[in-house]
Image (cartoon, rainbow, N blue to C red):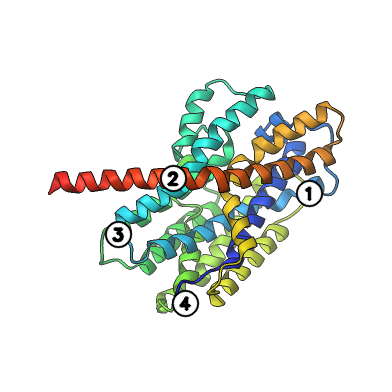
Amino acid sequence: MRKYYNAIDLIRFVAACLALIHHMATKAWFRPEEFPAKIAHMSGPVSFFTQYGGPGWVGVEIFFVISGIVIANSAFGRGPAKFVIGRASRLYPAAILCAPLAAVLLYLTGALPAGWPLMVIKSMVLLPKGQWIDPVFWTLGVEIVFYGLVALWTMQKRVSLEQVAVGLTLWSTIWTILALGGVEFYVPVERALLLRFGSFFALGIFMWLRSEQRATLATRIFMPLAVSLGAIEIVLNSKTLTVVSYNSVAPLCLWGAAVWVMADSLANASTARSGWMTGLGKLTYPLYLSHTTVVGAAMYGLGLIGFNATWAFLIGSGVAIFVAWVIANYWEPPVCAAIKAALTNWRGRLSRSIA
C-alpha cells in the first residue's frame, strides 16, 4: 500500500515562501546592489516582512533535507534508467519555462544582464556552475550533483543507501572542521562536491530509512551527527547572510521545526493523499524557480502606478503563487509526460542497438 507524507508537501511550500520573503521583502531592501533589488526597485520597506523575513534563507536547507527523503523513497528498488528518467521529467519542465520567463521579466524591468542568452541556457539545463539568469537556480545545481551520486548508487548492489548517507555525513564533517578552523572554500567547488550540504541530504536519507525500518546501528550513530552538522552550517551561514540584525536562533528554530514535522509525517504516513497539501507541494518547485522575477516584476510595475511597497509585495506574492499554480497544473504534466516518453523511447532504442 502506497504511503503519503502529506505534511512534507506542506513544509515544502512553507520553505518556498520563506525564501520568497527573504529575497523580496528583506534582501531586496537591505542589499540594493544584489539581484532581488535590481528587479523589484523597492520604494520602501515592506511592513513586518522586511524586518523579520531575514531568516527565510533557511528554506534552502529545509529543501535539501526534503530532497534526501524524496530521493531515498524514489530511488530505492529502482534501476538507474528509471531513476534518471523520473528525476529528469520532474525537474526540467519547470526549468525550461521559468528560465526564459525570467529573461523576459528582467528585460521588462530594465534588469536584463549582459550575456543573458548563455545564462538562460545554463539555467534551463540546470548546470551546477553559473552564472544563471536568476541566482536561485544555484540550488538546482547542487540537487543535480546529489541526484548523480544516487544514480551511481543505483548501478550497483554492494554499497547500501545507508552507507551513502554515512559517507555524505563524514564528507560534510571534513568541511565543518575546516570551516570552523577558518578555512574558506571556493563556493562553486564547495557546492559541486556537496561539501557544505551533504549532511542535509544524508539526514533526509537517514530519516526515510528509519521510517521504513531499514536503518541499522549506523543510522543511530550518524543521524545525530548529521543533525549537528546541519545546525553548525546554519550558524556559519547566519554570519554571512545577515541582512538585518538577528542571530542564528531564528533560522535554527525554523529548520528544527521543519525537520520535526518531517519526522512526524514519516512516522505517521497516511494511506490517503491530502488534496490541498499535495496541491501546495506541486506548485512549490515552479514557485521557487520564478519567485524573484515574478514578484520583483510585479513590485516594480505596481510601484510605478502608485502602490506602496507592502501592497506591491503582497499582490506580487499572490501573482507568483498563481503563476506557479498554472505552471504546475497546465505546463508541467504534458511536458513531463513528453520528456518521460522521449527518454523511455531513447532508452529502448539504445538497448536494442546494444543487443
Q: Which mark is residue 192?
A: 2
* Tag 3 near tag 1, CB within 8 Å: no
Horizontally, residue 34 falls left or right of residue 354, namely right
The residue that appears at 77% across and 37% down in the rendered structure is: 29
How many residues crowd mark 2 within 10 Å: few (<14), some (14–19), many (20+)?
some
Q: Is residue 30 above or below residue 233?
A: above
**C-alpha gap between disc 4 and disc 3:** 27 Å
Horizontal and vertical percent position of residue 336:
45, 46
- Whether residue 184 can be seen here: no
The answer to which image quadrant residue 232 occupies is: bottom right
**N-terminal label among 1 and 2:** 2
- Residue position for label 1: 245
Horizontal and vertical percent position of residue 28:
73, 37
- Residue position for label 4: 220
**C-alpha gap between disc 3 and disc 1:** 48 Å
- Residue position for label 3: 79
